[in-house]
Amino acid sequence: MQKRRTAISPTREENYSDWYQEVIKKADLAEHTKVRGSMVMKPWGYALWENIRRILNEKFEETGHENAYFPLFIPLSYLEKEAQHVEGFAKECAVVTHHRLEQDEKGRLIPKGKLEEPLIVRPTSEMIIGETYAKWVESYRDLPILLNQWANVVRWEMRTRLFLRTTEFLWQEGHTAHETKEEALFETKQMLNVYVDFCREYLAMPVVPGQKTEEERFPGAVSTYTIEAMMQDRKALQAGTSHFLGQNFAKSSGIQFQSRTGDVEYAWTTSWGVTTRLIGAMVMMHSDDDGLILPPAIASKHVVILPIIPNQEQEKHILDYANRLKKDLEKLQYKGSAIKVHIDKREMRGGEKMWSWVKKGAPIRLEIGPKEYEAKTVSLFQRTKPPKDRRSYLANELSSLLPELLDEVQKELFTKADAFRKTHTHRIDSLEDLYRFFTPKNPSSPEIHGGFALAPFDPSQSADKLQEDLGVTVRCIPEEQPQEEGICILSKKKTRTYAIFAKAY
Amino acid sequence: MQKRRTAISPTREENYSDWYQEVIKKADLAEHTKVRGSMVMKPWGYALWENIRRILNEKFEETGHENAYFPLFIPLSYLEKEAQHVEGFAKECAVVTHHRLEQDEKGRLIPKGKLEEPLIVRPTSEMIIGETYAKWVESYRDLPILLNQWANVVRWEMRTRLFLRTTEFLWQEGHTAHETKEEALFETKQMLNVYVDFCREYLAMPVVPGQKTEEERFPGAVSTYTIEAMMQDRKALQAGTSHFLGQNFAKSSGIQFQSRTGDVEYAWTTSWGVTTRLIGAMVMMHSDDDGLILPPAIASKHVVILPIIPNQEQEKHILDYANRLKKDLEKLQYKGSAIKVHIDKREMRGGEKMWSWVKKGAPIRLEIGPKEYEAKTVSLFQRTKPPKDRRSYLANELSSLLPELLDEVQKELFTKADAFRKTHTHRIDSLEDLYRFFTPKNPSSPEIHGGFALAPFDPSQSADKLQEDLGVTVRCIPEEQPQEEGICILSKKKTRTYAIFAKAY
């Protein structure tokens, strides 16, 4: 049997990395620019970020947070205050050294107006926000401070990849300060759970929550919690983190308060964030060889109507019918917001138009031609089914059915991804098995192999050698731990701790 | 009669500039940081920007625009392509010259990794977006491109003032490319009108639309349209601009397309934007000597409930009553979105608490104590009335009345500001009168004087001398022009054009 031609070339099996780039390109999500490592997020891609922002904002509000905005620039002297933090970010900072330009005799622009103190473009805002909190906090009555900011940040990356790793990216960063250690720890875990729920419910991403080992922690944090997702090449992708910063940053920024007992104490702080990376993760997790597949709960258009107009005479009827349908469907809600419908009126060959929406991942396509108009029906195509798999519905019927249908698609994507994750999560009990697990077996698709190896591991061990030999790192100590004792695959000592090892983005 | 003590000191009359800073401080909108000219937008202030963003996004969508996101950094070589543009922005650019930091022997951080080509932090994005559009456009079928971006931009300002002039600020910038000059001109004016309507309807700001003279144009534009607002010290504040860029930027970026007749033509482009400045304008226009006054259509909380609890016994009843009331009121809508109610449960003296909301400008305060609880009433205070002006309503009654009441407040603010603008807009027909008009008369409040002088003016004249002598500039050639011929106050020649002259922020 000949294989069907796919809309994306290469396929996942042929070349997973190129497939990913091609899915993004064909879905019109984003593109590279000539500006080092920076991308343009096109409307179809940026709309996903806007939805992420809208939904997370609701969840942040429910958990008592407010949004604020802090400066883009951080004076060098702020950064110097936290030694580990500096070490973590110094190698990848954009540094502003001048504040104007002058033309030289050849007309070329030359930086002028050297700053007394250089500024760095924020790679993260602990230090600048800490300085502000130090001014705001005097007494325990001023705590907790529960703020979040939506912002752009810059980390100078040498190797970039659309959404997954870019020099400039968009994110949200929560920064909270608390009276007690317990409160701060509660906050850290609460926000991790917000991310877990959000990823599962909206992005249909079955993420694994856990804790980072010391080696993999955020620079300056006491502990880092993470959510790890498995991509279709079985690599891990860190999809969000929540840091318990202890009193480290409060000490370096001077966030002190008078406690209930009258003592002067340092506050306990946390920070937590997700980035535009989430979009890359979603693309890699759900898309297929025909392009993007958008989970309905995050799609900016749930339904695309394709009017099929054989001649000018019938144009008005069919477009009227499409408009009425759009209006009816947009009265419906899915996951608490209005269903969005787009009518594609572009003048273009029908096949080309249809495939453009397959590649863009619209959850539901409706074709409306003279037949459908006559019979008051629609021809419905679902992105998670084969592209030509047509079902007929009465238009009336659809409006009661659509939210349910979208929910089915949403659940189908989650279930599929979750089954994939389970299939490729293996219990490993020896180093030999680990090496074997991470060795490509299929020469025609060497990128797709391995998975999550759950192995007994003493977290005080360094896993550097695995990184060198296999490109494998400890992704996390997952929340869900096997109950029995094991033998650490590295130290060969008894341990009750299990870690997930994987190759990662 | 002794003057009532005001919550803000100094008052507007005593020192208008200090009054403004103090209103912002006491309303908890924003504060300065140690980072040159950058501010922190606190939750109460940032929420205003989020509302501006939400409402304008709807209006942009209605007019066919989509959001996207373009890089923060612009290579110097892009900037060099448009000579006037460079000249306009070169003096105030943050320049990134290095991409990492290293510690020297004393442990100080030193910029390292010099970039081959310096990058500037975007002061505006015409050049970077133009480069991208040039790639996207091949044929007239690819036009129009109608995009907007919400972003931070940086202009190195020597003298800064919260919201009105900061080194980093937030804005939206629309960038569109069109097939014809007419379309681009239509777009330019359409977006100006979007701003006019938004300011009037939501910010209760009666802005004057008009065109800038050549001297005051955006660097590189063919024409710049503006909206000018009058502050309470009668100075003008430019609240938004919309630029018709002709083919200037298309030529420098290479946005070319094959036309319907097969010729290769340059696209016609526009750009338009409003910034966090709008918040400053709103503060300056509506607030009084007791602090901020928020127009209900932009307030993040429409109603604040202050429970008055004389003893623990009554606490539960009163808080339950407050919660029920909040729930009922939040079912209501004002201007298409849900009414937001906040219950202030802080432990704090009643007077202090009440004044904190006066200073924060909440449109409606409700006091609920044992009396109100018993009688199922509320004591209502409206921010636009004297602080102690109490009205009693049945709780039931309020829920049918509240949207109307909010609308009254909204209209009252607009009407008041519009009357003020009209009172201080004077027809001036000679230079002497103009000099007299802009001379302070009241020595106890020298800042408050002048206004908008509408005078016959030949726009090819330079108004430099007025700037030098009086600090007065041409704000705009207003859309609404007197019908009769006049004598240009500078050239003394006949003209049919009238301009608005004013001191400005």
Image: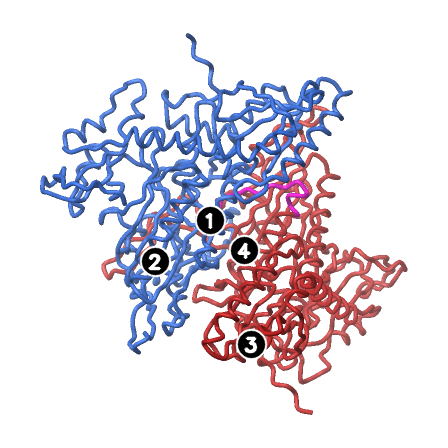
Chain colours: A red, B blue
Percent across and percent down for residue A195 are: 68, 53
State the residue in front, B19 or A83: B19
Q: How many marks?
A: 4
Q: Which residue in the protein does label 3 denote?
A: A370
Does residue B489 appear left or right of residue B224 in this picture?
A: left
Secondary element under disc 2, as helix, strand or loop, is strand
**Gap between marks 1 and 3 measured at Cα:** 39 Å
Q: Chain of mark 2?
A: B
Labels 2 and 3 in the same subunit = no
Q: Which residue is mark 2?
A: B270
How far apart are the alpha carbons under marks 2 and 4? 26 Å
Q: Which amino acid type is shown beneath numbered disc 1?
A: Leu
For the residues labelled 2 and 3, the Cα–Cα distance comes to 41 Å
Q: Secondary structure at mark 3?
A: helix
Residue B357 appears in which quarter of the rendering? top right
In front of the other: label 1 or label 2? 1
Q: Are marks 4 and 1 in contact (CB under 8 Å)?
A: no
Which region shows up in magenta? A59-71
User: As drawn, is B7 to the left or to the right of A401?
Assistant: left
Q: Quadrant of the C terminus of chain B?
A: top left
* Numbered circle sitting on residue A170: 4
State the residue at coordinates (67%, 55%).
A335
Please check the rendered image and state whether residue A64 is part of the magenta-colored stretch, yes or no. Answer: yes
The answer to whether tags 3 and 4 share a subunit is: yes
